[in-house]
Image (cartoon, rainbow, N blue to C red):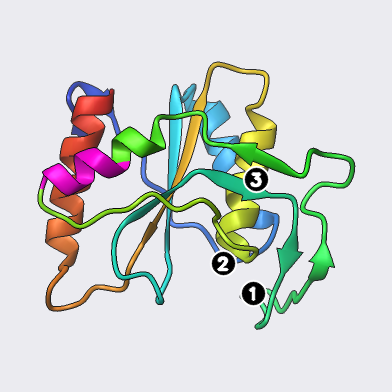
């Protein structure tokens, strides 16, 4: 994605695939730059289309260790927090706009229970009493019929329209 879309500065971070740490880095950066919105992206190999996520659940489960070797088994993301949080950006509209702008997309109702969900839940929890909008979008692995450039172009147009 470019450095700006529709007059909005786009800050990009490459986050570690690690429970807690990815969310801590993202939240700190968002606070530091005074972000109006945070749209986190993650790759989901089994996904065939771009999937904005409706909800994050308060559950960690790893069938494989994260990059720090952590392998939580049915643990809460944040003890005492609600069972789930819902996107605070218009994810249904985002899916529609991505579809209309050249890449297949469908709304998903759960970000899973691995690091992507952990990141999403923590961001939603962190910004729950603020005006910062939060969304998470899973991207499929690049395939011949869905190249990274097509995904980026559709995402760019969606961001331009939504914001």
Magenta range:
95-101
Q: Which mark is residue 66?
A: 1
Q: Determine crowd level at label 1: few under 14, some 14-19, many 20+ residues with C-alpha closer than 10 A.
A: some
Was residue 99 drawn as part of the magenta stretch in this picture?
yes
Q: Secondary structure at mark 1?
A: loop
Rendered position, 96 above or below 75: above
Residue lying furthest right: 80
Q: From the viewer's perspective, is the residue at label 2 or at label 3 nearer? A: 3
Q: Which mark is residue 150?
A: none
CB within 8 Å, label 1 to label 3: no
Who's the residue at 61% across and 48% down the image? 56
Q: Does residue 48 show up?
A: yes
Q: Nearer the viewer, residue 105 or 73?
A: 105
Rendered location of residue 53, percent (x, y): 47, 48
Residue 162 placement, left or right of 150 = right
Which residue is denoted by mark 2 in the rendering?
17
């Amino acid at each position: 994605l470019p450095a700006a879309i529709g007059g909005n500065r786009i800050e990009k971070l490459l986050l570690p695939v690690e429970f807690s740490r990815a969310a801590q880095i993202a939240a700190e950066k968002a606070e530091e730059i005074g972000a109006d919105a945070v749209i986190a992206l993650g790759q989901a190999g089994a996904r065939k289309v771009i999937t904005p996520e409706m909800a994050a659940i308060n559950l960690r489960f790893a069938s494989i260790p994260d990059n720090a070797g952590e392998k939580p088994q049915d643990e809460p993301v944040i003890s005492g927090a609600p069972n789930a949080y819902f996107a605070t950006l218009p994810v249904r509209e985002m899916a529609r706009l991505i579809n209309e702008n050249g890449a297949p997309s469908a709304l998903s109702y759960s970000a899973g229970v691995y690091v992507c969900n952990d990141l999403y839940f923590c961001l939603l929890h962190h910004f729950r009493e603020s005006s910062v909008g939060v969304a998470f979008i899973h991207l499929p692995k690049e395939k011949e019929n869905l190249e990274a450039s097509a995904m980026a172009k559709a995402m760019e147009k969606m961001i331009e329209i939504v914001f």
